[in-house]
């Protein structure tokens, strides 16, 4: 038996683990003492190997004919993909093609894919699931501080006097960060504020639980700021020395006294004041947030509000403080960093900036690069729906379950002339493809992931690719070569990182040799730079940080007579997203094998719904049948459905309405109704 040190494939915490290997198979996992998990793993980490040898793994390329899918050789598959991409590019132009990249894949693979889109297809039409996740963080923290990433580090949480968790179910979704929060409370006397419409586990440990109505976060935060201003708890020294635009902020915040905010959020005014005082007097206060904040039509405004709150109290640029978006996928931070976004090259260098383009043209040895930002994910689907987008290359994403309004997604994907899906499993999306390409999993390749705390860490190949599957970057490179471009013919993933680092200033000092001892946190400017534990100690990206005052706006869809209940959606501990991997893990599947809807006991009583009964949930976009779980975790008038289960897909119901600033969809609020199916179906 041998063991290979690598990084967990599931969430953005980035725990280190060993894969135990026997006879060319991964047979188990052991935690590593190093890394953010400190020798511990959550149940997903402990079972991270279980999907690898699933009999359902894709092992051969598939091609669709009139009978359905048939196995084909790599040669045939690559030849067809290259020929069709080239023909569509020739006939309709580069912007008729698009690429969805993957936050499950390595930095090296995402780098290759964005280079493929830009250089070989000739378009900036590249995006990935960060659009559905932290697009509003990238825009909101970009506008206030300068960079859309955690300002501080995981270890920093334990230096905070007060921890303010808002819209993050940390103990289920980032369990090894949840553990730090609990340890900070228990061992260091940290005090906890939780703002979440649901009574999540962390709420039990909170001194104050602000249980506001979904979609009212801007009002809530403005309310806290109005208290801070009226009680003179703001940090005038910090404001004057390090920020701009305070007066405008003050004017807006003052319009939100807590009594007024109570009417919008449903949170008692006194609780809002108490939370404001606790946060402002902490000395060191850390804000931790995630999807409860970002996935709204006001997602950018929500993020900006948290930055405003932190600036007003001087809680940025020092240990134990900051505004900390918990990034979700194992490598969603990295996929953004290396340019799998339609408006930026690697390292957030803008495609509209001539100097940046010239630099990339030189590095990539091409005469010209597209100077217009490409399509975002929802724009790609709409463009396919309208018939403008003709071909889509989807790598490691499952929009048929993960995007809002999946009836629309299905029609859009069906409308394409050519769909290629590259995955480790035949996902709901792959089932619609013309060609399916089998990818090697994290256990079968080398590379790096960048965790939520900007830490670039190694993954290491433990076994040979399962079946005929190949590393994602090799597949992309073969398509490129077949299309006549040799610039992706790298010898190894390490070689890709060297090129990436050479043109990405924040990764400038990163090389594989330096990553063996715990990884490096960006910005890491040069080979002697030690990496950066927390941002903005001296300067913000633009010198000073900006207050951006924002007013409260209601969600796009509110309950009414026809659809009287608010639906919010999200995740559970045991499953990851669309379940492609976790539902193939016997350990995780045994914990929970079926989806459900959380309904408050009083709502259940008035609707005469019993525990475990199947109900129908309907929105303006679709309907599903799902088991009822009656629980006081969820407040009256709201229901919660996890989006993990294909049999009861939450995204058949959700609203695709977008935040105009970041194009993130409002999957955290829409209006629905519940119907009984009657005793026969119970
Ligand atoms: N087990 C597990 N872990 C995961 C994932 C997974 O699928 N499974 N996915 C990973 C990914 S990609 C991500 S992005 C993260 C997401 O991690 P989280 O954001 O923590 O997960 P969610 O369940 O989407 O939502 C978090 C909380 O938002 C609350 N909420 C709902 N509406 C509102 C609102 O209007 N305002 C506020 N303040 N809160 C609201 C919900 O009650 C919920 O408790 O998790 C990562 N980790
Ligand atoms: N209603 C609702 N919808 C949501 C959300 C919500 O809170 N509510 N959250 C949104 C968020 S935050 C996110 S991040 C998205 C996630 O949306 P997706 O990223 O689309 O969901 P996943 O199921 O994680 O899909 C990842 C795919 O990658 C495949 N894969 C794994 N490893 C590899 C590999 O090495 N190579 C390749 N090629 N493929 C691989 C998996 O089999 C899987 O099919 O969902 C979003 N959708
Ligand atoms: S906390 Fe996240 S990174 Fe750590 S073991 Fe669990 S899923 Fe993996
Ligand atoms: Mo996410």
Image (cartoon, rainbow, N blue to C red):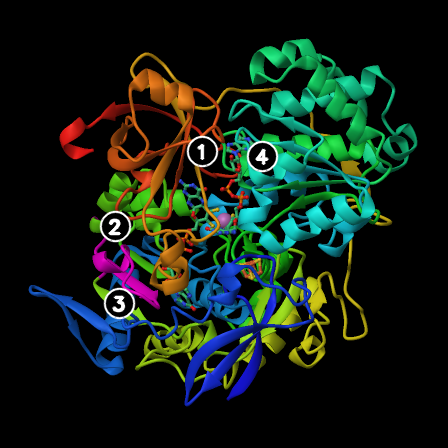
Label 3 SS: strand
Residue 529 drawn above or below residue 541: below
For the residues marked 4 and 2, what is the alpha-carbon distance in whole angstroms? Answer: 28 Å
The quadrant where residue 306 appears: top right
Residue 374 drawn above or below residue 526: above
Task: Tell me where residue 247 appears, x and y as whole percent.
Answer: 80, 21
Residue 37 highlighted magenta (yes or no):
no
Q: Which residue is mark 1?
A: 666
Q: Quadrant of the C terminus?
A: top left
Q: Which residue is mark 3?
A: 436
Q: Which residue is mark 2?
A: 413
Task: Tell me where residue 65 appears, x and y as whole percent.
Answer: 11, 66
The quadrant where residue 74 appears: bottom left
Of residue 165 and residue 404, the one placed in the foreground of this image is 165
Provide the residue span drawn in magenta. 415-433
Q: Which residue is mark 4?
A: 300
Q: Earlier in the sequence, mark 3 or mark 1?
A: 3
For the residues marked 1 and 2, what is the alpha-carbon distance in whole angstroms? Answer: 21 Å
Of residue 5 and residue 455, the one placed in the foreground of this image is 5
Whether tag 4 and tag 1 are in contact, CB under 8 A, the answer is no
Q: Earlier in the sequence, mark 4 or mark 1?
A: 4
Q: Earlier in the sequence, mark 3 or mark 4?
A: 4
Q: Earlier in the sequence, mark 4 or mark 2?
A: 4
Q: Earlier in the sequence, mark 3 or mark 2?
A: 2
Q: Residues within 10 Å of mark 4 (few under 14, many from 20)?
A: many
């Amino acid at each position: 038996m041998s063991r290979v040190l690598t990084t967990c494939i599931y969430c953005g915490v980035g725990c280190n683990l060993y894969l135990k290997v026997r006879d060319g198979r991964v047979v188990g996992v052991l935690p590593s003492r190093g890394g953010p998990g400190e020798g511990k793993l959550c149940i997903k980490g402990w079972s991270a190997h279980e999907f690898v040898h699933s009999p359902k793994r894709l092992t051969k390329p598939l091609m669709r004919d009139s009978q359905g899918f048939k196995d084909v050789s790599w040669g045939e598959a690559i030849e067809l993909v290259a020929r069709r991409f080239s023909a569509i590019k020739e006939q309709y132009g580069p912007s008729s093609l698009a690429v969805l990249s993957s936050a499950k894949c390595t930095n090296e693979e995402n780098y290759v894919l964005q280079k493929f889109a830009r250089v070989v297809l000739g378009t900036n039409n590249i995006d990935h699931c960060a659009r559905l996740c932290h697009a509003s963080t990238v825009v909101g923290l970009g506008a206030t501080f300068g960079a859309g990433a955690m300002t501080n580090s995981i270890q920093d949480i334990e230096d905070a006097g007060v921890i303010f968790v808002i819209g993050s179910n940390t103990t289920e979704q980032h369990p090894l960060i949840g553990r730090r929060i609990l340890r900070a409370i228990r061992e260091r006397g940290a005090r906890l504020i939780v703002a979440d419409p649901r009574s999540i586990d962390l709420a039990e440990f909170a001194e104050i639980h602000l249980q506001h109505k979904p979609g009212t976060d801007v009002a809530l935060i403005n309310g806290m700021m109005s208290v801070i201003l009226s009680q003179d708890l703001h940090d005038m020294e910090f404001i004057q020395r390090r920020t701009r635009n305070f007066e405008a902020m003050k004017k807006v915040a003052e319009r939100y006294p807590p009594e007024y905010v109570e009417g919008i959020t449903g949170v008692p005014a006194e609780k809002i004041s108490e939370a404001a005082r606790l946060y402002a007097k902490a000395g060191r206060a850390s804000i931790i947030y995630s999807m409860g904040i970002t996935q709204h039509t006001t997602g950018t405004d929500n993020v900006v509000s948290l930055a405003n709150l932190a600036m007003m109290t001087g809680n940025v640029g020092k240990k134990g403080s900051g505004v900390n978006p918990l990034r979700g996928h194992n490598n969603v931070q990295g996929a953004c960093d290396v340019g799998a976004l339609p408006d930026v090259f690697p390292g957030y260098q803008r495609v509209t900036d001539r100097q940046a383009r010239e630099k990339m043209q030189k590095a990539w040895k091409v005469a010209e690069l597209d100077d217009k930002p490409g399509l975002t994910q929802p724009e790609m689907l709409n463009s396919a729906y309208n018939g403008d987008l003709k071909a889509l290359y989807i790598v490691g994403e499952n929009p048929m379950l993960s995007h809002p309004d999946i009836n629309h997604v299905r029609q859009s994907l069906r409308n394409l002339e050519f769909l290629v899906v590259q995955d480790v499993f035949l996902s709901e999306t792959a089932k619609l493809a013309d060609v399916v390409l089998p990818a090697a999993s994290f256990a079968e390749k080398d590379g790096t992931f960048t965790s939520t705390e900007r830490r670039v860490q190694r993954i290491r190949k433990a076994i040979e690719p399962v079946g005929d599957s190949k590393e994602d970057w090799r597949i992309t490179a073969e398509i490129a070569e077949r299309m006549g471009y040799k610039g992706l013919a790298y010898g190894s993933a390490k070689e890709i990182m060297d090129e990436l680092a050479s043109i990405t200033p924040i990764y400038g000092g990163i090389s594989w040799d330096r990553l063996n001892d715990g990884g490096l946190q960006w910005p890491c400017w040069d080979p002697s730079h030690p990496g950066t534990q927390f941002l903005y100690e001296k300067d913000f990206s633009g010198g000073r940080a900006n207050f951006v005052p924002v007013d409260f706006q209601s969600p796009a869809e509110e309950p009414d007579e026809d659809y009287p209940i608010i639906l919010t959606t999200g995740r559970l501990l045991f499953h990851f997203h669309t379940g492609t991997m976790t539902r193939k893990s016997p350990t995780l599947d045994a914990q929970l094998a079926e989806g459900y809807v959380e309904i408050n006991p009083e709502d259940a009583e008035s609707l005469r719904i019993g525990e475990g009964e199947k109900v129908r949930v309907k929105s303006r976009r679709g309907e599903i049948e799902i088991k009822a779980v009656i629980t006081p975790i969820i407040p009256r008038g709201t229901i919660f459905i996890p989006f993990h289960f294909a049999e009861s897909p939450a995204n058949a119901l959700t609203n695709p309405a977008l935040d105009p600033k970041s194009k993130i969809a409002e999957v955290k609020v829409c209006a629905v109704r519940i119907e009984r199916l009657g005793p026969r179906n119970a």
